Image: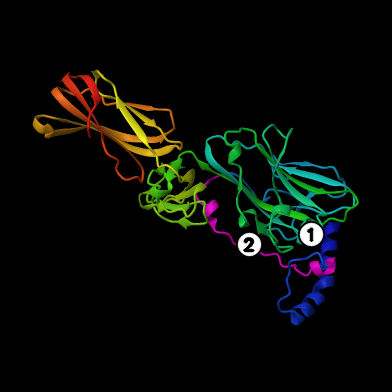
């Protein structure tokens, strides 16, 4: 192919310069700056792989895996892949010059005319997943793709057969990288496609764009993988968590998983540049400042399946949470009203209903207990104890404790009980 010959000639022409440069400048940077001319930029010619932890691949279900093994040169793309050709001289080719993995990669070479060349995946089904990611390897010149912005690799997604596209990745947004080195898109952060879960006709388009009259360079792609977490293994980080400043540390014991094979490894990011590897029952975290924090957790099971969870934490100052309680005057069982009379939500309130009776109220029975996950200001929650048998005068003691708060005084009510009924319930002295 004519472009392959051209690139090989460039490589030979700079070989001597490379040797001299290494001898004179042991710390020569291979990352081009705006002051470097093109001949210096092409000194970096080693194509090596960036090694990445397999965290975001192992155990996930593969939705698409394309290394162009079944392609044929120069334009025999694998089944379902569709090129859109606007420049007849140079567009996407099946290339064997130096792929990331043998035998081929996809490459678009430059031309002096306008290039708007697309390579589109087959239709993908994103149903029944909890998280989805795109990963691929790419290779280009930093100087000409970013510093000079002669050309772009725009990766876009469509959910309507290609009628409309949304940009999801572009090399311009990355930090500096070495020219002519294969890079994994995960080297900064995974490309998250979870916003498109449950879409049934998803296509991903790799667009090489270079404006008319601009001397661009090549862009190569290889080993394209779309992978997702199946709904058979799901993580919940708990929350949302609302904590008064005085009630810290925040307790994350409410996180949970469904499915997978224990034991699990929990990796927490608390949203304040602090992390931990602890199970939920041992996970407590202090925040240094008031405010809102986005918490994420990654859970890996013994079979290397991975699940992801997210939660929010709101830490505030001012008046601590206050809960008022009231009961029905009569009826079967005890109906309790819990009301948040403060200005902030209250999370994970542990409540309890206890009845005392007999001489000096020496007999005691816990009738009901539970948790209110979130109590919003001015919007009460109602709990019914169900029926229980008794006769005579009783004391009803109700407590409601926000997570992390000191135990508040019990609210006491007096009532009269016959069988399953209570009568004349009213507030008493705790």
> At which x and y percent is residue 66?
65, 48
In front of the other: 131 or 117: 131
| Range of residues picked out in magenta | 37-62
Q: Residue at x 43, y 54 (%)?
A: 286
Image point (16%, 23%), residue name:
389
Secondary structure predominantly adopted by residues drawn in magenta? loop
Q: Secondary structure at mark 2?
A: loop
Check the picture and name the quadrant holding the C terminus: top left
Q: Residue furthest bottom?
A: 23
Give percent across and percent down for residue 138: 70, 55
Task: Mark 1 or mark 2: name the one nearer the start of the chain.
Answer: 2
Can you tell which quarter of the image residue 383 is in? top left
Name the residue tied to disc 1. Answer: 147
Instruction: Give the CA distance from mark 1 to mark 2.
Output: 22 Å
Checking the image for residue 300, the label placed there is none
Left or right: residue 126 versus residue 41 is left
Question: What residue is rendered at 80% in x and 67% in y?
Answer: 41
For mark 2, what is the residue?
Answer: 50
From the top left corner, tell me how far across and down residue 73 is, in percent.
Answer: 77, 51
Mark 1 and mark 2 in contact? Answer it, CB < 8 Å. Answer: no
Question: Looking at this rendering, what residue extends furthest in the front direction?
Answer: 429
Task: Indicate yes or no whether the magenta region holds residue 43.
Answer: yes
Compared with 184, 87 (above or below) is above
Q: Is residue 101 visible?
A: no
């Amino acid at each position: 192919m004519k472009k392959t010959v051209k690139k090989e000639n460039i490589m030979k022409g700079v070989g001597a310069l490379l040797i001299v440069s290494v001898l004179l400048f042991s710390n020569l940077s291979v990352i081009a700056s705006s002051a470097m001319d093109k001949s210096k930029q092409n000194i970096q010619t080693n194509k090596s792989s960036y090694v990445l932890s397999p965290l975001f691949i192992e155990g996930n279900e593969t939705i698409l895996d394309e290394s162009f093994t079944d392609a044929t040169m120069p334009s025999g793309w694998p089944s379902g892949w569709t090129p859109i050709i606007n420049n007849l001289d140079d567009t996407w080719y099946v290339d064997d010059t130096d792929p990331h993995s043998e035998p081929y990669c996809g490459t678009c070479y430059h031309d002096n005319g306008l290039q708007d060349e697309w390579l589109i995946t087959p239709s993908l089904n994103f149903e029944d997943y909890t998280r989805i990611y795109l990963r691929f390897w790419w290779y280009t010149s930093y100087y000409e793709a970013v510093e000079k912005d002669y050309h772009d690799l725009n990766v876009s997604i469509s959910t309507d057969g290609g009628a409309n596209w949304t940009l999801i990745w572009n090399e311009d947004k990355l930090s500096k990288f070495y020219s002519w080195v294969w890079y994994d898109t995960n080297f900064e952060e995974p490309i998250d496609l979870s916003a498109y879960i449950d879409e049934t006709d998803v296509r991903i388009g790799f667009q090489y764009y270079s404006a008319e009259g601009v001397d661009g360079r090549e862009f190569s792609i290889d080993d394209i993988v779309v992978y997702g977490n199946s709904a058979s293994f799901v993580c919940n980080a708990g929350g949302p968590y609302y904590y008064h400043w005085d009630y810290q540390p925040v307790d994350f014991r409410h996180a949970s998983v469904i499915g997978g094979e224990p034991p699990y490894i929990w990796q927490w990011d608390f949203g304040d540049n602090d992390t931990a590897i602890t199970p939920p029952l041992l996970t407590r975290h202090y925040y240094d400042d008031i405010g809102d924090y986005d918490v994420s957790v990654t859970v890996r099971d013994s079979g290397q399946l991975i699940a992801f969870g997210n939660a929010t934490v709101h830490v505030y100052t001012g008046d601590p949470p206050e809960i008022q309680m009231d009961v029905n005057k009569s009826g079967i069982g005890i109906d309790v009203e819990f009301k948040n009379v403060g200005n902030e939500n209250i999370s994970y309130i542990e409540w309890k209903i206890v009845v005392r009776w007999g001489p000096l109220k020496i007999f005691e029975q816990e009738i009901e207990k539970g948790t209110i996950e979130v109590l919003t200001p001015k919007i009460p929650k109602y709990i019914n104890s169900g029926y229980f048998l008794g006769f005579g005068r009783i004391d009803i003691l109700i407590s409601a404790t926000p997570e992390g708060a000191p135990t508040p005084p019990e609210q006491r009510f007096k009532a009269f009980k016959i069988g399953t009924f209570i009568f004349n319930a009213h507030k008493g002295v705790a």
